Image (cartoon, rainbow, N blue to C red):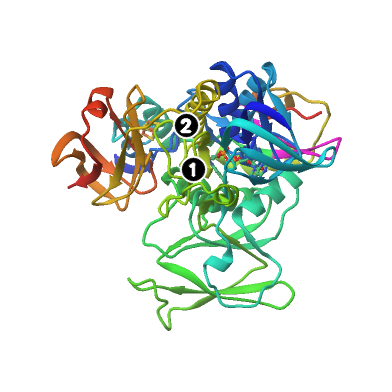
Amino acid sequence: MKKVNLTCIECPIGCDITVEIDGEKVLSVQGNACQRGKLYVSNEVVCPVRVLTTTVKTQNGKMLPVKSNKPIKKADIFVAMEKINGVVAKTPIKIGERVIADIFDGVDIIACADVE
Amino acid sequence: MKVYDVVIIGGGPAGLAAAVSAYDSGAESVLILERDDVLGGILNQCIHNGFGLTRFKESMTGPEYADRFIKEVRKRNIEVKLKTTVLDLCEDKTVTAINEREGVFFVRGKAVILAMGCRERSRGALNVAGTRVAGVYSAGTAQKYVNVKGFLPGKNVVILGSGDIGLIMARRMTLEGAKVHAVCEIMPHSSGLKRNIVQCLNDFDIPLYLNHTITRIDGDARVTGVQISKVDQNKKPILGSEFYIPCDTVLFSVGLIPENELSKNAGVELSPKTKGAVVYQNRETSISGIFACGNVLQVHDLVDFVSEEAELAGKSASEYARRGDREKDCVNCIAKDKITYVLPQKIDKNQSGNVTLFFRANGVYKNCRVVVENDGQEVLSLKKRVVVPGEMERVILTEKIIKALNGDLTLKIVE
Ligand SMILES: Cc1cc2nc3c(=O)[nH]c(=O)nc-3n(C[C@H](O)[C@H](O)[C@H](O)COP(=O)(O)OP(=O)(O)OC[C@H]3O[C@@H](n4cnc5c(N)ncnc54)[C@H](O)[C@@H]3O)c2cc1C
Ligand code: SF4
C-alpha cells in the first residue's frame, strides 16, 4: 500500500488530493472538493490521460485549432502530435467536424473553430 | 454623424457579451468596433482547454468559447465593423475610428462600452541587462505566432515569469518540438494556476526555478544564452549563484495591464490599483454614459467572469441609452487590510438590486474572514478557508444593506 499526493487539474481550484493505492487498486481518496477530482486521481494513478489541444494547417493556409474529443494516454501525446502535424485539413470546415478519425482507440481529432 | 444606442469598442469576449446583452435589454442599434479581422479577441490564440467550466459546465477551448458568443451576435441585428481601429474617444461619446473602406470616420454612442482588453507588460518594465537581440518575445506574442500564424519562434527556450500564459506556452512549444529548458520565477511561489504547473510543466519534466531570475541575455544578432541567478528575500540577485543556459529564445510572461489609452483621452478616471476605470456597480465610469467591462476594467483570470461582467455593462448601457443620465447618491468602497483592490469602487445608492463586490487579497491567508464595515459597524462577515492573490473573490451585499449605508464602506481580511 502507498500514498500518492496529486493536484487535481480538472478545474482552476486545483485541490491537493491524497490517494491510497494498493497496486492499481484505489483504497481511499482525500482532499477532493468534488467527484470530478476522485475520477481524475483514479485515472491518474493507473494511466494518466489528457485532452490534447493543438493546431493543424488548412488548405487555405490558415491554422485551425483542434482538440481530441476524448482524453488520450499521456504516453501517446507525442505520437499523436506527429500524426496531426502530417495532416492538412480540407476547407471549409465547421466547428465540431472531424479532422482525423480514430487517431487512437476511438478518439477523434475535431475542429474547434469554423474556417471558410 | 451616425448615432447608435450603444457603441462597443473591442470585439473580444467582453465586447461580444456586452453587445448581446445590450441588444436583448432593448437597445435598438448596437455597433461593435474591432481592429482585428475576426471577432473573439485573445480567445482566438488561446487554443488550450479550460474555458467555460463555470458558465457552460464543460471544458472548452478559447475558440470554442468565442464561437458560442459570435453566433449569438450574428443571430441578432448587431452591426460589426472588423479591421476597424478606434483612434479616439471624446467625453461627448464621439468615437473616431479608421478602416480601409471608410477611412477615418466618426460615430456617436448614446452610451459607449469600453471592452479593449489588456496587453502584456513588456521587457522594458523589467530591466534585464543585455543587448536587444532577436529571439526575445512576450509569451502572448509567441502564442500568436505558434497558434495563429503557425510557426515556431525558436527551438531552445527559457521562460521568465510563471504566469499562466508562460506555463501554457512552455507546454505548447514542447508539443511542437522545442525544448523548454527552464521557467524562472522571481517570487517564492508561482503566479500561475496549480493545474498549469502540473499539466504544462510537470507532465513534460520542465524545471521551475522559484526565487530565480534572468540576470543577463547574451547574443549578437540572436539570443545565444541567458544567465540565471538566485535572488534573496529582497529579490536582489545573490552573487555567485549564477548559472548559464544556452538557448535561442526567451519568453517573458510577466503579467497583463489593461489597455486604457482611449479611456485616458476621454478623461475617464482610472484606478492606480487596477489600472482600469473607476466604476459604479452598473460598470459606468466617471463619465456618465461610458461603461467598461472585461480585462480593460480589471484583469480577469476566467473568461466566464468576463462574460458575466460584460452582460451587466451591456444591460446598463442600454438602460442609459433609453433613459439618459440619472442622479446618483454615491458611497466609496475602500480596500483596507490585506486587500489589494475592490471593484466597483463606487456604489450608487439610487440603483436597485444587490451589489457584488469583487476583490483580490494581497497574500495567501488561511481560515480568515472577509469583513465589510460601514459607519464603524460590521455589516457583513464571510468565512473563507483560503484566499490567494491569484483568484478574484466576491462578496454579495443585499439591497437592504446598500440602502442602509451611511458614508463610505470598507472591506478587509481578518485572520
Ligand atoms: C494567454 C491567455 C490565456 C488565458 N487562459 C485562460 C483560461 O485557460 N481560462 C479562462 O477562463 N480564461 C483565460 N484567459 C483569460 C481570458 O481569455 C480573458 O480574460 C478574456 O479573453 C478577456 O476578454 P476581453 O474581451 O476583456 O479582452 P480581449 O480578449 O483582449 O479582447 C479585446 C478586444 O478589443 C480589441 N481592441 C483593443 N483596442 C482596440 C481599439 N482601439 N479599436 C478596436 N478594437 C480594439 C482587441 O483587438 C481585442 O479583440 C487567458 C488569457 C490570456 C491572455
Ligand atoms: S476536485 Fe473538483 S473542485 Fe477540486 S480541483 Fe478537482 S474538479 Fe476542481
* First reached walking from the N terminus: tag 1 or tag 2: 1
Task: Find disc 2 in the rendering and name its residue.
Answer: B309
Mark 1 C-beta to ligand 1 under 8 Å = yes
What segment is highlighted magenta in the picture? A55-69
Is A58 part of what is drawn in magenta? yes
Residue at 70% of width from left, 43% of height from top? B96
Query: Horizontal and vertical percent for residue B227?
Result: 54, 76
The quadrant of the picture showing ligand 1 is top right
Q: Is residue B261 magenta?
A: no
Instruction: Check mark 2 vs ligand 1: CB closer than 8 Å? yes or no.
Output: no
Q: Nearer the viewer, residue A102 or B275?
A: B275
Quarter of image, res B116: top right
User: Given the image, what chain letter belongs to the residue carrying mark 2?
Assistant: B
Foreground residue among B159 and A76: B159
Where residue B404 is drawn, which disc sits there?
none
Answer left or right for B56 relative to B369: right
Q: Tell me, yes or no, whether dots 1 and 2 are on the same chain.
A: yes
* Side of B301 relative to B3 (left or right): left
Which quadrant holds residue B63? top right
Crowd rating for badge 1 (residues with CA inside 10 Å; few <14, some 14–19, many 20+) = many
> Which element is circle 2 on?
helix
**Side (left or right) of B395 relative to B38:** left
Most common SS among magenta residues: strand
Vertical position of residue B215 compared to residue B97: above or below: below
Badge 1 vs badge 2, beta-carbon distance below 8 Å: yes
Quarter of the image for residue B28 reads top right
